[in-house]
Image (cartoon, grey):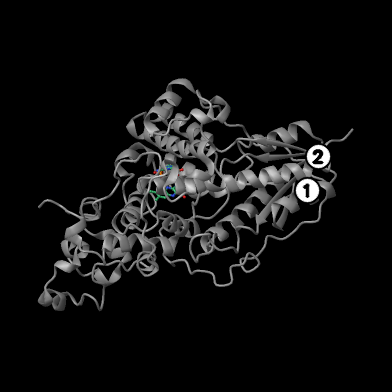
Amino acid sequence: MTETALVWFRRDLRVHDNPTLRQATAENDCVVPLYTFDTRQFGQSSRWIDERRVGTLRAQFVRESVRDLRERLNDRGGSLLVRRGDPRSVLPEAAESVDADVVHAQRLPVPEERETEAAVGDALDSRGIDLATHWTHTLHAIEDLPMAVENVQDTFTPWKDSVEANSQVRDPLGPPASVPTPDLEGTPIPTLAELGDDEPDQPADDSPMPVSGGESAALERLQTYIFERDRLREYRETRNGLLGMDFSSKFSPWLAQGCLSPRRVKQAVDRYESERVANDSTYWLLFELRWRDFFQFQFAKHGEAYFRSGGIQSREVAWNRDETAFRRWTDGETGFPFVDAAMRELRATGYQSNRARQNAASFLANTLRIDWRWGAAYYESRLLDYDVASNYGNWAYVAGVGTDSRDRAFDVLWQAHNYDPDAEYVRRWVPELSKLPPRYAHEPWRMDIDEQARYGVELGVDYPEPMVDPTAHFEGPSS
Ligand SMILES: Cc1cc2nc3c(=O)[nH]c(=O)nc-3n(C[C@H](O)[C@H](O)[C@H](O)COP(=O)(O)OP(=O)(O)OC[C@H]3O[C@@H](n4cnc5c(N)ncnc54)[C@H](O)[C@@H]3O)c2cc1C
């Protein structure tokens, strides 16, 4: 008897190290891959703010990733069905139409995806079709954790220590040799307009984040960053950089859509360590991937509690909900150049370095005391690498309602001078300040009237006055 499996691709848009696809091809004579653009996300508004859940840059990245997946399946004799709609109805209908015996799918830890999976499972069950799910997106498999998910520690270091001592990372799987898909009518990938993106944002022409979606580009970047440009050697020293492609790996957009498997990254790091050098930097990339894992397991443990204003700690905080102030932050018009540079970069490129994210997030949540979920929702819309657990987990952490309740308020002025000593980052993204010396580029309010005239920057006209009193919130550099 010929068995048919439908493979429901979710955030695992790759053929390498994809246990879902491998099991389906190993156990079935016929495999039908499917991707659905979920119309409860594409084209929909956030539940907290007036922003699309999926902004243009990420929508485009996902389209490219799906196109590349289709090509890589084609190379193995397979094809990809593409649908647009609600997976809760699309999946059961598609499975029935191809006479599937089983649906294989990735298992995800966040509430919305879990509910979708449960609803799809019920609908399939009523049609006599099985649903088999696979946890495939973390470095450490959920089955290999030294603790049950409900016992995952709420602070990173003890969890990481335990995992490093007691859990092995499995070797990545290769792609299946072939994907035996029956002749199916190809369906085009929806356009941005069909995905509800009527007014696409314009990416910066000279975006320093020129990444395209898909497994092919991800594997190329892995090779380029680690081996060709040899950047892993100094990753720990450079990772707090702000400008350019190579101060950090930039793997995040591909990891978020599953175009790249973290185990495949570890395999490359292992090879680099045996062929070139093993040092703090090579360890540190895996350390950061464990941060990523940590938030995935945190969400598996706490679920919806992560979206409460008081977070998993249920902290009582009287968050401010001032929309005008919030928009000054999103628009990069706070009057604090380091924060404004970060917000303008995000809008233009879909990316911010980790350092820029921490500062911009802290400014919103700790300085302005605006509901951190508004900020997280804005990042959800704009980030190329948006991932539910990494985004809301990091935001909650910075806002002091997540895995660590310590005060995480950043001294944005100190950070600006320390990490951007020549104000290159500020000058790149806030061009109206480009002629100022670094001290004034970071603190333009220090200029007197004569200096404003000399540099051609009138405060309150050419660049905003600071929206809060700098001296009341920040100490800045000591000198
Ligand atoms: C407020 C805020 C929101 C964030 N939102 C996201 C998000 O939606 N998606 C996302 O992938 N990362 C998020 N991060 C984490 C981090 O900023 C990015 O992963 C990183 O900047 C991506 O650049 P990179 O790939 O060059 O990172 P690298 O420094 O090269 O790190 C390698 C990989 O490790 C992982 N990683 C590194 N730092 C973290 C971290 N703090 N938490 C989780 N994973 C990490 C990422 O997968 C990253 O690609 C957020 C951080 C903050 C402070």
- Residue under label 2: 129
Name the residue rendered at 44%, 61% in the picture.
349
Q: Quadrant of residue 413?
A: bottom left
Q: Where is residue 83 shown, x and y percent of the image?
A: 72, 56
In primary-sequence order, the first of circles 1 and 2 is 1
Label 1: few (<14), some or many (≥20) within 10 Å?
Answer: many
Q: Quadrant of residue 332?
A: bottom left
Q: Where is residue 395 shown, x and y percent of the image?
A: 40, 49
Residue sitting farthest toward the right = 1
Q: Quadrant of the N terminus?
A: top right
SS state under label 2: loop
- Residue under label 1: 92
Q: Where is residue 41 shown, x and y percent of the image?
A: 60, 58
81 sits left or right of 325 in the view: right
Label 2: few (<14), some or many (≥20) within 10 Å?
Answer: many
Residue sitting farthest toward the top = 166
Amino acid carrying label 2: it is: Ile
For ligand 1, tell me if the residue under mark 2 lies within 8 Å: no
In this view of the protein, can residue 382 be seen by the observer?
A: yes
Please, is residue 195 above or below residue 392 in the view? Answer: below
Amino acid carrying label 1: it is: Pro
SS state under label 1: helix
User: Is the residue under label 2 in contact with that under label 1 (CB below 8 Å)?
Assistant: yes
Q: Where is residue 360 shown, x and y percent of the image?
A: 34, 56
Q: Quadrant of residue 335?
A: bottom left
Q: CA distance from mark 1 to mark 2?
A: 9 Å
Q: Tell me the number on the disc at residue 466.
A: none
